[in-house]
Amino acid sequence: MRDYVRGLLGPVGRKNSWQLAEFASHPAPHRLQHLLARACWSADEVRDDLQTYVAEQLGTPDGVLIIDDTGFVKRGTAAR
């Protein structure tokens, strides 16, 4: 999970399994694909683990992190 998130947040140009695996120094994308397609995990537990990690990294466990998902509206109708 950590390698996948680091790849998504890192300087990887195209965010596909091969590039993310390469960024994480994996020989192939199989582990990342397993995580996304077949692994069983609890979204609530992942959220709680992430919250604990962020609180440790940012300094205060009672702090607040606000994520703004502001983006650009896609123009046109063609899929990319």
Image (cartoon, grey):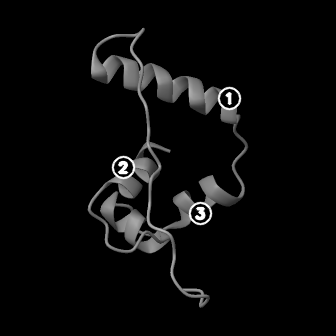
Question: Splitting the image into 4 quarters, where does residue 44 fall?
Answer: top right
N-term mark: 1 or 2: 2
> Disc 1 marks which residue?
44
Residue in front for this viewpoint, 72 or 63: 72
> Disc 3 marks which residue?
33
Q: CA distance from mark 1 to mark 3?
A: 21 Å
Q: Amino acid at mark 1?
A: Asp
Left or right placement of residue 40 versus residue 25 in this view: right
Residue 30, how many percent across, how many down? 55, 65
Residue 74, how many percent across, how many down? 51, 76
Left or right placement of residue 75 versus residue 20 in this view: right
N-term mark: 2 or 3: 2
Quick check: marks 2 and 3 in contact, CB under 8 Å?
no
Residue in front for this viewpoint, 58 or 29: 58
Q: CA distance from mark 2 to mark 3?
A: 15 Å
For label 1, the SS is helix
Write the residue at 72% across / 55% down: 38
Question: Splitting the image into 4 quarters, where does residue 8 fall?
Answer: bottom left
Write the residue at 49% across / 29% down: 50
State whether residue 1 is above or below residue 21.
Answer: above
For label 3, the SS is helix
Quick check: marks 1 and 3 in contact, CB under 8 Å?
no
**Badge 3, how many Cα within 10 Å: few under 14, some, many 20+?**
some
> Disc 2 marks which residue?
6
For label 2, the SS is helix
Q: Which mark is residue 18?
A: none
**Badge 1, how many Cα within 10 Å: few under 14, some, many 20+?**
few
Write the residue at 55% across / 87% down: 76
Residue 75, how many percent across, how many down? 51, 82
Q: Amino acid at mark 3?
A: Gln
Residue 69, how many percent across, how many down? 47, 49
